[in-house]
Amino acid sequence: MRAAVVERYGGPDVVRIREVDDPVVAEGELLVRVEASTVGSTDGTNRVGRPAFARLFFGLTRPRHQIFGYDFAGVVERIGPGVRRFVPGDPVYGTLSPSPGAHAELVRVAEDGVVARIPGGLDGADAVSMLDGFFTAIPFLRDGGRVRAGQTVLVNGASGTVGSAAVQFAKHLGAAVVGVCSTDHLELVRSLGADRVIDYTQGDFTDAGGRYDVIFDAVGKRTFREYRPALTRDGIYLSTVPTLPVLLRARHARSTETGRRAGILFTGLRTQAAKSADLALIGELAASRAIVPVIDRILPFEKIAEAHRRVDGGHKAGNVVVAMAPVLLETRATPEAAS
Ligand SMILES: NC(=O)c1ccc[n+]([C@@H]2O[C@H](COP(=O)([O-])OP(=O)(O)OC[C@H]3O[C@@H](n4cnc5c(N)ncnc54)[C@H](OP(=O)(O)O)[C@@H]3O)[C@@H](O)[C@H]2O)c1
């Protein structure tokens, strides 16, 4: 099979398509022919090997896992002995996180791993674009922020993968949502259900006098100290990015303590059971169109280095998809896909 292989840390051009051995499916496992995957922010940071301490986990001198990508959508090609829930031909989506390997034409997934049938009406590109953002936004808002109807939630970075999911999920929970992004993305964020959008290029929302029950900094661009005055008395600031100040202040994030506080979660490290439950929720919400995929662009698998470049830019709107199945490019003749 073909896979995108990263043999050393560096810029987007270190990602090369290579022939590698097909995975061998074992008992209780599915072999999935991948139609689409996403290149996400985590792939970008894994590729450059920063921050430096992350190399303790990802490989000191070169990446330990040389095939990146966590999320996949595709079709079950073969099943191992004992598999009951799936048959060859089933359209499925899921995640391999915390171990990568989805930037490949075939992946091996445990039947009791984080995998489910794709809800009707979604193709592979749509399906895979529901994963990274919602797998992150759901636990942050539901478990970290305990968001409930009537609260006001501000999402900073509302047009990114995590932010666009957070806007939608906070609306689903019944909150009033304020999204912060740049001028180019105001319409997108409004279309996802935000009650108000703030253009960060035109001013600082913390100066505008608003008070929020939850501030979710999906892109970790500011500090708790800067946000604190914009929180309600018992408001919580949640960040996806583990900076030292956030880590030092984050100890009360999931406690029942009151007062203005900060929190962080590491959603990729949650149990398979917790992720599977959230995949079921994502499936239900997607099937009822309560949430929709947000796709920045779809690129052919061969152009995966370009996908990494787009991610490195820090301004993608939603997800950057790489398509292994040419049909996804044909049916979605976006300028990016066609180029
Ligand atoms: N802790 C966890 O468990 C966890 C899980 C998943 C992801 N993450 C982390 O979450 C972060 C976000 O990931 P992502 O994939 O959502 O990022 P992303 O899609 O790359 O974010 C891009 C968005 O950020 C916006 N942005 C850029 N500069 C901004 C600024 N100064 N103020 C407000 N918005 C700004 C851009 O909007 P404009 O173009 O309009 O500027 C763009 O739409 C990453 O650092 C990732 O590693 C953490």
Image: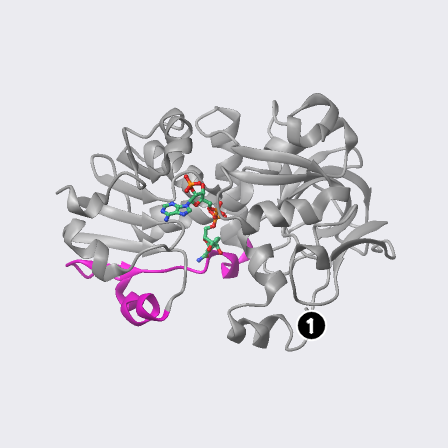
Which of these two is toward me, 248 or 299? Answer: 299
Residue placed under numbered mark 1 in the picture: 62
User: Circle 1: is it few (<14), some (14-19), or many (20+) Cα within 10 Å?
Assistant: some
Depicted 87 relative to depicted 13: above or below: above
Q: Extreme front residue here?
A: 202
| Whole-percent x, y for residue 78 in the image | 83, 43
- Left or right? Give the position of 297 relative to 290: right
| Whole-percent x, y for residue 292 in the image | 49, 29
Residue 238 lies in the magenta stretch? no
Which of these two is toward me, 290 or 297? Answer: 297
Instruction: Locate the C terminus and report the quarter of the image it occupies.
Output: top right
- The residue tagged with tag 1: helix, strand or loop? loop
Asked if disc 1 is less than 8 Å from ligand 1, the answer is no
Depicted 290 relative to depicted 60: above or below: above
Residue 265 lies in the magenta stretch? yes
| Whole-percent x, y for residue 160 in the image | 46, 42
Quadrant for residue 223, please give it.
Answer: bottom left
Residue shown at 32% from the left, 49% from the top? 216
| Residue 208 visible to the viewer | yes
**Color style of the picture:** one colour
- Left or right? Give the position of 184 relative to 52: left
| Amino acid type, mark 1 | Arg
The stretch of residues the image draws in magenta is 244-272
Quadrant for residue 46, please give it.
Answer: bottom right
